[in-house]
Image: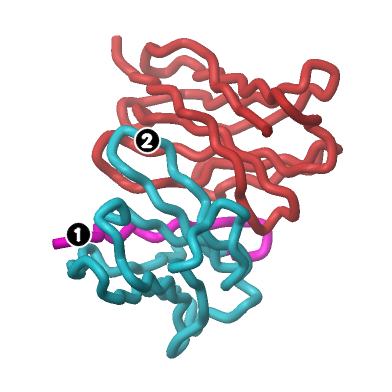
Amino acid sequence: QTVVTQEPSLTVSPGGTVTLTCASSTGAVTSSFYPNWFQQKPGQAPRALIYSTGNKHSWTPARFSGSLLGGKAALTLSDVQPEDEAEYYCLLYYGGAQVFGGGTKLTVL
Amino acid sequence: QVQLQESGPGLVKPSETLSLTCTVSGGSISNYYWSWIRQPPGKGLEWIAYIYYSGSTYYNPSLKSRVTISVDTSKNQFSLKLSSVTAADTAVYYCASGYSGYDYDYWGRGTLVTVSS
């Protein structure tokens, strides 16, 4: 059973920068895993932010960026805003299958 | 803009089959990948399956024996059937779209399905 691991929780101050990571139990994450990132606020559906490692959707704020970092996929939020407080999920592709990470609860405090 | 809307029973009895439909509006179901994803109350997301508009399917190995996904291009809809449900299948079920098969863009608002007698 493939497991995708994220930090359970992180806290960041408004205006600060924070990096969330996404690791695979199979080894290093590469671009071939096509990492995706999603934001979910309470009571809402997830919203797509990043696809294929670092590509943004038209609605993705510029302060969000995706990359590969130390064998993991990473989502970096710069100049964090209060409205960025949410749960963030990564998704990795394994051939025809997909596995979500457990999510990171980001608190802006 | 593409909009997705899930529909189906909100309550299903144990051992029965859960059936959901996702209606696509504001765009064509062609040339896209269409997925089902679920989220048990208070828990994380779980990918269930996806289908290309032409009919190619991909299933979560842990659910494959119980899941069927299908597409009806004439109605701009795609559907999910999950058989032999138990309380563990209680979740919000989302439908979502993706262009390349390696991305997601639009999501439905989700529908809560409770498995209970």
In the picture shown, does residue A75 fall above or below A28?
Answer: above
The Cα–Cα distance between marks 2 and 1, rounded to whole angstroms, is 17 Å
Q: Which residues are magenta?
A: A93-109
Q: Callout 1: helix, strand or loop?
A: strand
Q: Position of residue B103 (x, y in %)?
A: 64, 55
Q: Which chain is cyan?
A: A
Q: Position of residue A99 (x, y in %)?
A: 49, 58
Q: Position of residue A25 (x, y in %)?
A: 42, 74
In the picture shown, does residue A43 fall above or below B43?
Answer: above
Specify few, some or many for label 2: CA neighbours under 10 Å numbering under 14, 14-19, or 20 or more: few
Residue A69 circle label = none
Q: Amino acid at mark 2?
A: Gln
How many labels, in total?
Answer: 2
Front one among B7 and A84: A84
Do discs 2 and 1 belong to a common subunit? yes
> Measuring 37% from the left and 70% from the top, which residue is drawn there?
A77
In the image, B9: left or right of B77?
Answer: left
> Measuring 77% from the left and 42% from the top, which residue is drawn there?
B32
Quadrant of image for the C terminus of chain B: top left
The picture's colour for chain B is red
Q: How is the image coloured?
A: by chain
User: Dominant secondary structure of the magenta stretch?
Assistant: strand
The chain under label 2 reads: A
Specify whether residue A101 is painted magenta: yes
| Residue holding disc 1 | A107
N-terminal of the two: label 2 or label 1?
2
Q: Callout 2: helix, strand or loop?
A: loop
| Residue holding disc 2 | A44
The chain under label 1 reads: A
Q: Amino acid at mark 1?
A: Thr
